[in-house]
């Protein structure tokens, strides 16, 4: 194998691929990046067995086609720190790989390419198009609410549904839930559904560099794939039962207030400063045209903030974890946020944007807080 390529393009490709490659694994071969040189292109392949990526460099000169399996991190670090504009990659003998640029050179040990697992290729048929920016926006709107705790396996991903001309993404950790949807270019004939790991979704977004590009999505039996002009990414689906999110979203509400989103965000952060890990709660006292936010803990003290609101319905006091409210408001796309509720022990519903709903479960606190 002997290839000449642009250093910046190689650096970019290695940065993407190594982000999915584990530092340590019980299967050492996947700690490496797999290089395939053929037909005036260089393909970089990496996987952690749950997420896999193929990244293609097309502006290269292949003097000798071939493959190599080389240490991922040191290769990426060495290429990153090179000063030259072009890089030569070549195999030396049966177990060495050489990286050269000008007078700078590095020799690395190689691993037998046959030890690297088979990584799927994007299928030629059955894919659906979507504008790249629309896809990344759906992921960005929802990923923050996905579970991170052990024991909630099915909630560690984003439920992705396609029906008709609409795509939905849903994330929850059991205490809050977010739903976002977007229109597709063309309706699909059959509904599709998959729970895609959050890490996989983030990797999909990482390979997208042009929000106007039409990327391809594929719902497979065991994996979800995305294809751009440069890359193919695959994520193994989560096998489990995702919560029935429709049952969590209130079908109707009797009360609501509207507030300046930035001001509400600032007031919540202010009061949350006096709450502790053990008493991570703020109380919202919703009244006519006025919202009072109160927080207290024995160790940290007490704080109160006030905010003018537009109010309809019944006055009420409801307690929430302030972190969940702040997370939602950080992602609010409107200058004015709308909050709807029924009773103090029912979920609260935030409208964060068009086709963008955020549900937060209230919590029970003692009065006074301690």
Image (cartoon, rainbow, N blue to C red):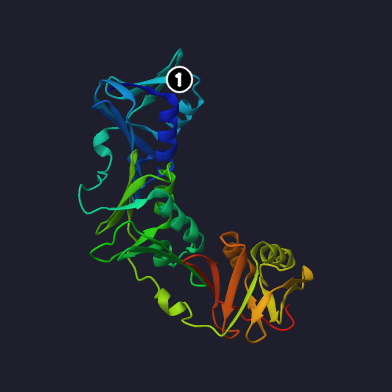
Closer-to-camera residue (21/208): 208
Q: Position of residue 114 (x, y in %)?
A: 23, 36
Residue, far top: 103
Closer-to-camera residue (248/332): 332
Closer-to-camera residue (32/140): 140
Residue at x-position 46% and y-position 78%: 248
- Above or below residue 37? Residue 135 is below
Residue at x-position 25% and y-position 57%: 220
In the shown orientation, is residue 303 left or right of residue 241?
Answer: right
Say which residue label 1 marks.
85
The picture quadrant where one finds residue 13 is top left
Mark 1 Cα shell of 10 Å, populated few (<14), some (14-19), many (≥20):
few
Q: Position of residue 323 (x, y in %)?
A: 62, 65
Q: Position of residue 35 (x, y in %)?
A: 31, 32
Residue at x-position 25% and y-position 53%: 127
In the shown orientation, is residue 55 left or right of residue 304?
Answer: left
- Above or below residue 30? Residue 273 is below
Q: For the image shown, how many numbered marks are present on the structure?
A: 1
The picture quadrant where one finds residue 69 is top left
Examine the rendering and report whether any part of residue 331 can be seen. yes
Q: Position of residue 359 (x, y in %)?
A: 52, 72
Quadrant the N terminus occupies: top left
- Above or below residue 94? Residue 360 is below
Residue at x-position 79% and y-position 70%: 301
Quadrant the C terminus occupies: bottom right
In the shown orientation, is residue 137 left or right of residue 226?
Answer: right
Give the secondary structure at mark 1.
loop
Examine the rendering and report whether any part of residue 54 can be seen. no
């Amino acid at each position: 194998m002997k290839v000449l390529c642009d250093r910046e393009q190689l650096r970019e490709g290695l940065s993407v691929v190594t982000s999915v490659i584990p530092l340590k694994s019980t299967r050492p071969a996947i700690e490496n990046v797999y290089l395939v040189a053929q037909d005036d292109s260089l393909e970089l392949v990496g996987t952690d067995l749950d997420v896999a990526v193929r990244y293609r460099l097309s502006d290269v000169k292949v003097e000798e086609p071939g493959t190599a399996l080389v240490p991922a991190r040191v290769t990426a670090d060495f290429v990153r720190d090179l000063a030259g504009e072009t890089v030569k990659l070549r195999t030396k003998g049966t177990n060495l790989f050489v990286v050269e640029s000008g007078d700078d050179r590095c020799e690395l040990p190689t691993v037998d390419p046959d030890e690297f697992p088979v990584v799927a290729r994007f299928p030629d048929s059955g894919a659906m198009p979507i504008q790249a920016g629309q896809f990344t926006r759906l992921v960005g709107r929802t990923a923050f609410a996905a579970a991170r705790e052990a024991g909630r396996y099915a909630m560690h991903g984003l439920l992705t549904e396609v029906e008709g001309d609409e795509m939905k993404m849903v994330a929850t950790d059991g205490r809050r839930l977010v739903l976002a949807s977007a229109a597709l270019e063309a309706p699909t004939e059959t509904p599709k559904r998959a729970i895609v790991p959050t890490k996989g979704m983030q990797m999909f977004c990482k390979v997208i560099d042009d929000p106007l590009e039409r990327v391809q999505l594929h719902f497979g039996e065991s994996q979800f794939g995305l294809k751009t002009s440069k890359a193919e990414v695959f994520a193994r689906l989560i096998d489990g039962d995702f919560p029935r999110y429709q049952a969590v979203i209130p079908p109707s509400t009797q009360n609501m207030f509207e507030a300046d989103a930035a001001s509400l965000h600032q007031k919540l952060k202010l009061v949350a400063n006096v709450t502790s890990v053990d008493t991570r709660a703020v109380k919202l006292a919703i009244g006519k045209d006025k919202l009072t936010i109160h927080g207290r803990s024995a160790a940290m003290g007490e704080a109160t903030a006030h905010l003018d609101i537009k109010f309809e319905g019944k006055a009420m006091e409801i307690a929430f974890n302030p972190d969940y409210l702040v997370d939602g408001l950080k992602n609010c796309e409107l200058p004015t946020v709308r909050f709807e509720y029924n009773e103090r022990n029912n979920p609260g519903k935030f409208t964060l944007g068009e086709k963008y709903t955020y549900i937060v479960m209230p919590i029970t606190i003692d009065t006074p807080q301690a």
